[in-house]
Amino acid sequence: MTDTTTTTWADSELRRSIRNLGLRWQARLEGNGPDRFIPWILALLLFIVFGALSLARYRSLELGGQMAAWMQGIWLVSQDAEPFVTLTGRNLFDGQFSLILWPLGKLATWVPAGPMLLTIQSFALALAVVPLWRIARRILELGVESALVLAAAYGLQPQLHNLNLADFHPEALSVPAFLWAYLYSQDRQWVRFAVAVVFALSTRSDLGLVVIGLGALLAVEGRTRAGRVTAAGGAIWAVLALGVFRADLAGGEFIAGDAFAAYGDGPISILWGMLTNPTQALSDFFARDNFNNLVLLFAPWMFLPVLRLRYQLPLVLFGVFQFLANVPPGEFGNPQQDVAALAFLPIAAAAALRAVGRRSVRRVFVNGRLLGGVLFASAVFFLFGAGSSLYNDPWTWGSRSVQDLDIISAVKTVRPDDEVAAFSPALPLLSERTMLIEFPRGLEIYKPAAPIFSTDVIIVDEADELWNDTGRFTFDQVIDAKGFEVENRFGTVSVYRRDTTDE
């Protein structure tokens, strides 16, 4: 009996000691002073993690043609040349009409384009913690433990990690911009609000649809005039950017047509096709991939955003069109389509915590078990769905294989003025040139008229598993007929150079 009493007393004392220690630390952190430096420390830690992961993949040559296309376009801007990206066959600005790429191109005059783009993207995604913290603490009056859990859940969001790893996407820079915009709207700092919104729009043309929803959110919250102006501005930008500027850059074509080819070939016909064929639209909208994506976005927050549906208004229009678009997924899916959700779902989760919390004199405190559940769910879905999950051994990234070193050696033999066709891993290392083409792997027949055979240099992996007998035979025949000879071999990587002495 004595032992049992002693054990129970010891356990009780331990619990009280831990609780008292937690209360003392909470009291220290509840002041205004810690709110000025805690979010910046959290942002710095996230930036170190995000930056290290994305740059490690870049160093390991795991980024291919898509990253090289951004790098080539940015380099052309830095050289004051026409930003026609030969890897995509389009002007740099006619894809997303991302005006932010112009200042980034000028910045690339002084720093290498690839590391710069990845570092800026990682910095932007990490910076979003600062406005999220201020929204939680100053606007929603949550306790410091709730704000810490929100910051941790944001940092563990699987789609956020996938966006950070999926090459470079200028729209990723809109995530902190939308969070800052909402914060400024709550403080009625309309000039700063407008600057944040304009910055977000400069990253991608169709984010005007998000701004329309943001205006609706402001109107629902009682800021009717600001909501109307914001929604009108978003609508005007969406119409001009999608229907005029992007089409003009694409030679009069509606460049998003491929993604919506099932509905029509222009903005009006696409909308009409959706309205007149609702069965197809509903089938595309509720596709399994879209459902999986929704789970990865909502489940890490324990579906708390569902309790505050008005914060999904900025996601509605943008999300509907993204769900209906037929966009081929990359290695990490299409996380760039989730930028609006990555900005507004944390706000919705914070508002939901405030609704279920207990108000004291100055703060709203949330049950520790609920906060623990959010943290646990975030960790579980990070392990399940993030590209940088511990199951993917991210600590091994950044190392270089023997083939990576062979690719680097092959690239060093290429002259700056050479026109080059190369297989995907070599493309980012060759992006600073006006003519660069991705070598098409695994073709049944290689034809002499193919653009790759009009270049000066072709770099291929002779051990590519996609080679077949017919493709290999026709490639060798055309190479010989076009006057290409093997200039160097590094392991399985061959450098073919065309003899131009007779031209």
Image (tube, helix red, strand yellow):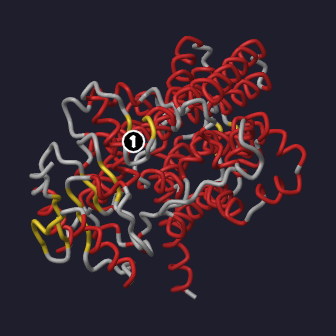
The spot of residue 190 in percent (x, y) is 59, 13
- Quadrant where the N terminus is found in the figure: bottom right
Q: Is residue 176 left or right of residue 273?
A: left
Residue 182 vs residue 426, the one in the foreground? 426
Q: What element carries label 1?
A: helix
Q: In this view, does 416 lie to the left or right of 267?
A: left
Regarding residue 129, the answer to whether it shows in the image is no
Q: In which quarter of the image is residue 433?
A: top left
The spot of residue 175 in percent (x, y) is 52, 37
The spot of residue 78 in percent (x, y) is 26, 29
Q: In which quarter of the image is residue 287?
A: bottom right
Regarding residue 243, the answer to whether it shows in the image is yes
How many marks overall?
Answer: 1
Residue 287 vs residue 454, the one in the foreground? 454
Q: Report which residue position mark 1 lands on.
A: 121
Residue 143 vs residue 458, the one in the foreground? 458
Q: Is residue 3 left or right of residue 361?
A: left
The spot of residue 6 in percent (x, y) is 51, 79
Crowding around mark 1 (Cα neighbors within 10 Å: few <14, some 14 to 19, many 20+) is many
Q: In which quarter of the image is residue 404?
A: bottom left
Furthest residue toward front: 502
Q: At 42% from the left edge and 35% from the top edge, which residue is drawn?
A: 92
Is 58 rendered above or below residue 475?
Answer: above
